[in-house]
Amino acid sequence: MQGGALDPRQQQAMQHWLQAHEEHRRAWEHIQRVNQRLRGLSSPLAHAALQAPRSASRRRALKTLLILGVGGAAGLTLQQHNPLPTLLADYRSPVGERRRQSLDDGSVLQLNTRSAADVRFDVQQRLVRLLEGEIQLTVANDTRPLHLLTDFGLLQLSSGQYNLRHYPHYSQLAVYQGNASLAGNELSAGRQARFNGPQWQANQALDRNAGAWVDGMLVAAHMRLGDFLDELGRYRRGQLNCAPEAAELLISGSYPLADSERILDLLEVALPVRVRRFTRYWVTVEARA
């Protein structure tokens, strides 16, 4: 509640909303954390991102949160992941589709299934924010730095090619070309690492198969079937389950993502499993008896 955005009645309603449910408090803390990260940027671009929510945009956002909070009495709760920024994103891709977008500076942004990103460029710097899902970013050479923002950290990238994926508790960056900096800590080409703060975690050699989605492929090399189906499920609507007795089976191969039903049919040929389709949106892969 900064900048006098709310009158006393609205502030009281906001306090009631925050106290009504633990998830409401977490959602507000999430907004505050994002603001803190943006304060690390020095250009007018960052100031615009911070100032706008304090005025009309912030009032609209808070009113939306309050409306959702009222709905909580009827069984609606606000998750920590607020869908509104995703719905209003500059670039989005629905489930099962990918999108390629050329940016004003010559960079190329590619979005994987169910992904969303905002892009803000000004005369001093470039900012790309991953809101959901996964992107591959080819960064053009430019005198302005390029910053990549997620819920878990702020990166500075040189010209090059990068893959960034959002997970529930961290983000993971893969560096194909170029160099990435996280709070002064470097990650060089040929490496990938996780982060949910100022330090890289699980810094390891690049898994190039993970970026095959750009070419419309899902590539597995001795992958657990459970993990394989988790990946495939990202490209389908509904629930794709793996029974525990089948999860540890290993699978290898290259599979076109355009037809996930065909991939499921192939599993029955390649592995001792059967695919049970209860409905189009509820599928379970089980070990064959």
Image (spheres, rainbow, N blue to C red):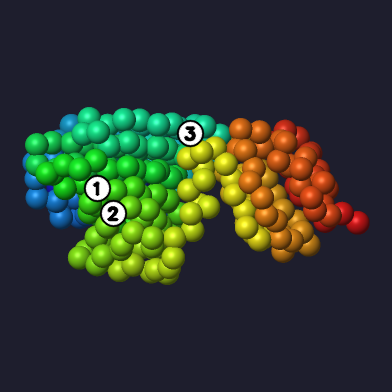
Q: Nearer the viewer, residue 54 or 216?
A: 216
Name the residue rendered at 16%, 42% in the picture.
Answer: 142
Q: Looking at the rendering, which quadrant does residue 88 occupy?
A: top left
Q: Is residue 70 left or right of residue 52?
A: right
Q: Can residue 26 be seen from the camera position used here?
A: no
Count of marks, rendered view = 3
Q: Nearer the viewer, residue 278 or 254?
A: 254
Determine the secondary structure under disc 1: loop
* Label 2 vs label 3, nearer the camera: 2
Dot 1, crowdedness within 10 Å: few (<14), some or many (≥20)? some
Name the residue rendered at 18%, 36% in the picture.
Answer: 121
Marks 1 and 3, the one that precedes in the sequence: 3
Determine the secondary structure under disc 3: loop
Q: Which quadrant is home to the C terminus?
A: bottom right
Determine the secondary structure under disc 2: loop
* Label 1 vs label 3, nearer the camera: 1
Name the residue rendered at 42%, 51% in the picture.
Answer: 166
The picture places residue 93, in percent across and down from the top left corner, at 45, 32
- According to the image, label 2 marks what residue? 178
Q: Nearer the viewer, residue 113 or 191?
A: 191
**Amino acid at circle 2:** Gly
Q: Is residue 71 left or right of residue 9?
A: right
Name the residue rendered at 81%, 43% in the picture.
Answer: 276
- Disc 2 and disc 3: Cα gap in Å? 24 Å
Say whether marks 2 and 1 touch (CB < 8 Å).
yes
